[in-house]
Image (spheres, rainbow, N blue to C red):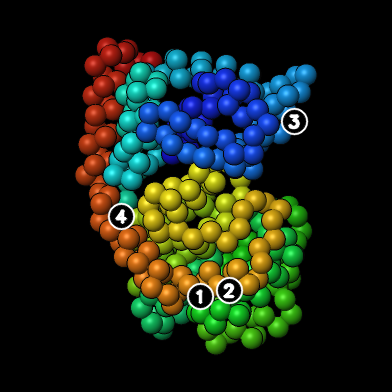
Amino acid sequence: MAASLLQFLFTNPVSEIISDRQIIEIRDRCINVNLRRSELPHMLRSELLYSPYPVLPVLQQAYGLAKGSCAATLVNTFDALESEYVKYLEESTGKPVWGIACPLHKPQFGVENESECIRWLDTQKEKSVFYISFGSQAFLSEDQMKALAKGIAASNQPFIWTIKDPVGGHVNSCDFLPEGFIEATRDRGMVIHGWVPQRLILSHPSTAFFMSHCGWNSTLESISAGVPMVVWPMAFDQFANARLLIEQLGFGLQICEGYDAIPSSDVVENTVTIAMTAEIGKDMRQRALQIKESINEASSKLSVKAFVSYILSLGLDDNK
């Protein structure tokens, strides 16, 4: 979806489409999306669009040259997940497009299986744990951490929360947690400072929901594991990814959006509680499992083979 939106925006008169509108209507073939201005890529919603030295024309030219010079496009997605958007890219570029994402398999061996968080998950009830991670590039401020922690504590749900520090910032992000939070939730939660085996956590029978910034890699991992998401998109393609999960796939809930936004702790509490205990959360878990069953490795392999065959059919010099 995100690649299709960029294809539309980079190949159409953006200033006419966006103008000073707060809601931007994008209509073209299968695309029928209303975006808020805040969800647009930075260069499309900032003063750069109207500056004396705009960046957008340069990006559009570079994008056009890249698309024009390529023979085909590979997209890191599942055909079963975004077939209409793969078709849109193919029709709008006039060149073949293949989705080549492959379901992520749970590792069967190695020290990851013996990690503390996996042993802790082994002691929890099935579909009872709420997993929280914002990836390796999204870092929460102190106010954001405190609001999130307050809501998680009030929900009374079992959780694993992995917290990473900003690179080179000399900051221990765990210091941003409210005083006494770890002790108060120790009997039902686990806070991990640093890396965790995310694929194992998502594929564990005890994991019920995943709170994420909705980066595409984390989103694909969650889809592969059949785990629905609570999302907080912050930048780049994350807004489009969140819309795909919520509006089209039907297994996402949103608590907040934007790098600088501070979520309401009440919203966090209510959303986590709904996800873990209400019927809508159960329905989303079922829907996520259905989507998981619809993706398969065979489709990915066929797409790769089709791509290779197509490239070879062009008669390109193998040495190039």
C-alpha distance separating marks 1 and 3: 40 Å
Looking at the image, tell me whether mark 4 or mark 3 is earlier in sequence order. 3
Q: Position of residue 37 (x, y in %)?
A: 63, 39
- Residue 269 got which mark? 2
Q: Which residue is mark 4?
A: 291
Q: Position of residue 256 (x, y in %)?
A: 61, 58
Amino acid carrying label 1: it is: Thr
In this rendering, is residue 255 above or below 247?
Answer: below
Q: Which residue is mark 3?
A: 47
Q: Nearer the viewer's eye, disc 4 or disc 1?
A: 1
C-alpha distance separating marks 4 and 1: 23 Å
In this rendering, is residue 80 above or below 72?
Answer: below
Residue at 74% x, 65% y is: 143
Amino acid carrying label 4: it is: Ile
C-alpha distance separating marks 4 and 3: 40 Å
Looking at the image, tell me whether mark 2 or mark 4 is earlier in sequence order. 2
Looking at the image, tell me whether mark 4 or mark 1 is earlier in sequence order. 1
Asked where in the image residue 127 lies, by quadrant, the reply is bottom left
Circles 2 and 3: CB atoms closer than 8 Å = no
Q: SS for tag 4?
A: helix
Q: Which residue is mark 1?
A: 273
